[in-house]
Amino acid sequence: MGTNCQFLKKTLLEFLGNAIDVTETRDYCVLTLPQKTIDDRLASVFVQEKMPGFFLVDDGGKTAAELFAQGIHVTDLKLAALEELAERYGATFVQGTFRIGCHTEKLNAAIVSIGQCATLATWYVLGHKPRFEEEPVLHRIEAGMRAWQAPYENEIRSRVRMLGQKMEHVMDFVSFPRNGHEDRRVEQVINKLDSRLPICVKAVRPSDNPLEQARGYGFMAYDLAKTQFETWPRVAVVTRADEWTQSAMDLVYASASIVVPIETGEEEKLEKLLPERLSEVA
């Protein structure tokens, strides 16, 4: 008995139609595709009609943001590889974002291409080996945040996504006031009943180039300016602080509300230090 190819095509189209999620945000659409990235996320593609019949298609900077969040520094060699990957799919990789500009007749192909770029670019995760002493840092940060006796009821959430002017950013943890209203889509956060602001906490690791990691944190602060997240206090937990240069540390201090430097082997101090520092910005 031969394979029914038309039936396969029909069922695949039905699967794709049901699996693709479309969300309207501000003046663009976000398509979540059924393509898993290597770090186990679904690829998202942002589509904006810049003028009648002409579209800008990109990954919202999410791929670069995820690499940064996992301590993977985009070296010149990695940057060249990402640019070449983009070129092979008819895209560009500029300022941490895969992007294609196209007319209506090429829109669907552009969406698929950006999805491919977002998926393949995360292969760097496979070769990334976090240092052992960094492994418990996020657990200690979370324990410190939950031990904090906030002057109001709060809720701790992990891996909170924030949409900046140019790309999406990921905060390791955010403490939300319970008497505010928080939509699951973070870009639609509205604090209705209290002037208290959510507090963001992010671990900043030196990776193989502390200055570049500091610049990445600084760009995040710059990109969140003039958005609803601009006034949210930011706490930067700088790991392996003994390996950072002074210029790199200065940049982090200039970009964060509070900096908590932790030297190698002293990670256990986080659970005591973090509640104290959180109280300073609450």
Image (cartoon, rainbow, N blue to C red):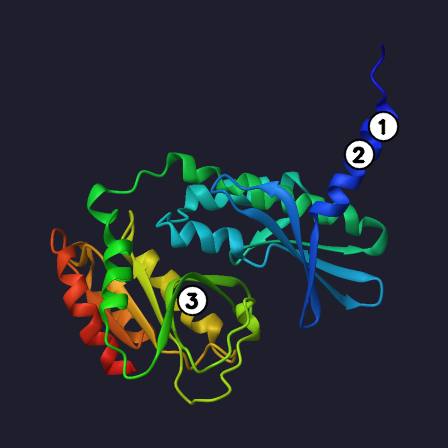
Side (left or right) of 22 relative to 188: right
Q: Residues within 10 Å of mark 2 (few under 14, many from 20)?
A: few
The residue under the point 41% across, 35% down is 126
Tally of numbered discs = 3
* Residue 114 percent across, percent down from the top left: 65, 47
How crowded is the residue under tag 1: few (<14 C-alpha within 10 Å), some, or many (20+)? Answer: few
In percent of width and height, residue 274 lies at 21, 69
Which residue is pictured at 37% across the width and 47% down the height? 72
Q: What residue is shown with label 3? A: 219
Q: Are marks 1 and 2 in contact (CB under 8 Å)?
A: yes
Q: Is residue 178 left or right of residue 116?
A: left
User: Which is more foreground, mark 3 or mark 1?
Assistant: 1
Q: Is residue 49 above or below residue 112?
A: below
Q: Residue at x 53, y 55 (%)?
A: 62
| N-terminal label among 2 and 3 | 2
| Sequence order check, earlier mark of 3 and 1 | 1
Residue 7's disc number: 1
Q: Between residues 173 and 255, which one lies in front from this camera angle?
A: 173
- Could you give the CA–CA distance between mark 2 and mark 3, rounded to whole angstroms? 44 Å
Q: Tell me: 233 left or right of 267.
A: right
Local SS, label 1:
helix
